[in-house]
Amino acid sequence: MFKQYFTSENGLFKRFANTPDRVYPRPFFDRNNQLAQDHISRIFINSAFSLLGITLILISAYAMDYRLLDGAPIWAKPIKFSLSLILHFLTLAILCQQLKPQQRTGKTFTLFGYLAVASMIFEQLYISIQAARGRHSHFNGNTEFEGLMYQLMGLGAFNLVLISFILGIMIWRYGDKNNSGLRYGSISGLLIGSALTLYYAMLMTLPSVQSHYVGNLINNSTIPLLGWSREVGDLRLPHFIATHMMQALPLLGLLADKLKLSPRIVLLCATVILVIMSKLALDLALAGQPIFPT
Amino acid sequence: MNSMLTAEQLFAFSSQAAFYGWIILILLPRRFKLVFYIPQYLIPAGLGLLYAALILKYFFIEPGGFNSISSVRTLFAHDHLLLAGWIHYLAFDLFIGSWIARQSDAIGISRLIQAPILLATFMFGPLGLILFLSMRATQYLPKESIDV
C-alpha cells in the first residue's frame, strides 16, 4: 500500500514532476508568460518574492529602531543582504530559462537549487536575528554557538554561489547554442562572477583578516546606502563588483543583442574590464585605502 | 475550572496543543485532508472553546478593560485572563497559519519556502502574514484560473 508514495508519477515526489496541466499564478512582471511554470523556476521566483516581504519587514524595523552596530544602523546589513539575494534569485530564475525544461528540472539542478534556497533562508534568518539582538553575524566567534553559526554561514554562502556556477556550466553545455549576447553574458557572468565572489569572500575569512576592513576606523564615515568605508580599505567593494557581474554581464549581453553589436567582443571587453576593476578594488582595499577618501 | 486545573496547567496544555498543530502544518504532507483539518479546524476550535469558557467566567467580574494600556494591564494582571489572551494568540495564529498553508499550496509555493513563513507566523503571527501577503500580491492569476 505504501508503494504508491514512492513512485515519481503519483506520490511523495509528485511535486518534483512537471505538472503542465496546472496553471499557477505568475509574477507581476511576467505578463507574456516567458517564465516557465516548473518547480525550479517557481521556487527561484518565490524565493525572491519572499525576500521582498522580508525586506518590507526589515525596512519597518529600520524606520523605528535607531540602534547602531559599528556605527551603522543595525538593520542596514540584513536589508542589504535581502536586496542582494532578491537580485540573485531573480537572476537565477530568469537565466535558467535558457535551459531545456528537462535539464532545468533534472536531479542535479533540483538538488543544488533546493540547497541554495535552504541556504538563503538560513542566512537571511540568522543575519536578521543577529541584527535584532544587536550582535555580529559574520566574523563573530564570541560564543561557541556564534562561532559555529559563522562557519555554517560560510557553507550557506558557498551553496549560494555554487548554484549560479552550476547554472553557468549548464547553460554553457546544454543551453541553446545560438551565440547570442545573452548566452555569452550568462555564461561569463555566472561562472566568473561566482568564482570571484567565492574568492573575495574567502579572503575576508582568512585568520589574518577576519573583517571586511583593512585598517583602523576613527570616525567611521561611510558611503551612503552601500556603507563602504571612506577611511580604510573595504573588502566588500571587490566582493560587490564580482557578485553583481552575474547581473551586469547578462544585461550587457542583452543590450549587445538589441544594438546588434558583436556579443563576443562586447562581453570579452566587459568581462576583462570588470575583472580588472574588481582586482584593483581588491588591491586598494588590501592596501588599506578607501575607494572614495574623505 | 479553578478547582480542577490551574492556569499554569491550562497554559501548558494549550501551548502543547498549538505546538502539535504547527508541527503537523509545517512537517506533515498535505495530501490527507483529515490530517490537515487538525491544525486548521480541530485545534483552533478546541482552543476557542477554552478561551470562551475563560473569558465568560472571568472577564465580566474582574477589573480592567480594552480602552487603555493601563486597563489592559489591569486585566492581564489576572492569571486566567492573561491565559485567555495567550490562547487567543495561539488559536488565531494557528488558524491563520493553516490558511496561509492552504493558499500557498493553491498557488504552488514550495514547502521549503512555506516553512519559514509558517515559522514566522508561529513565532510572531503578523510577520508571517505580511510575508505571505506580500508574496501573493506580487503574483497574478492568469485568465484560466485555478481553484483556490
Image: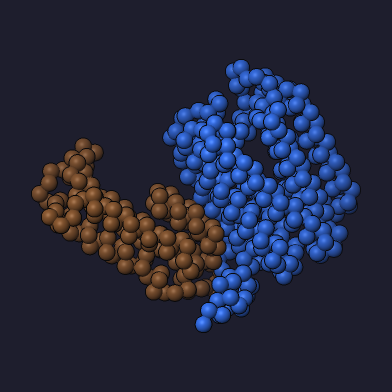
Chain colours: A blue, B brown
Q: Residue at x 50, y 28 (%)?
A: A68
Residue drawn at x 70%, y 67% as measured from the top left: A106
Name the residue at 23% across, 47% down: B82
Of residue B56 and residue A49, the one placed in the foreground of this image is B56
Q: Nearer the viewer, residue B138 or B69?
A: B69
Q: Position of residue A211 (x, y in %)?
A: 65, 30
> In the picture provided, is A40 more to the left or to the right than A245?
left
Q: Is residue B112 left or right of residue B118?
A: right
Residue A283's spot in the image, x, y percent? 79, 28
Q: Position of residue A112 (x, y in %)?
A: 67, 58
Please identify the residue farthest to the top as the structure is shown.
A218
User: On screen, B146 above or below A68?
Assistant: below
| Residue B57 visible somewhere in the drawing | no
- The quadrant of the image that shows the N terminus of chain B is bottom left
Query: Is residue A96 visible to the viewer in this orientation of the structure?
Result: yes
Q: Which sits in the foreground, A119 or A22? A: A119
Q: Position of residue A148 (x, y in %)?
A: 58, 40
The answer to whether residue B93 is left or right of residue A221 is left
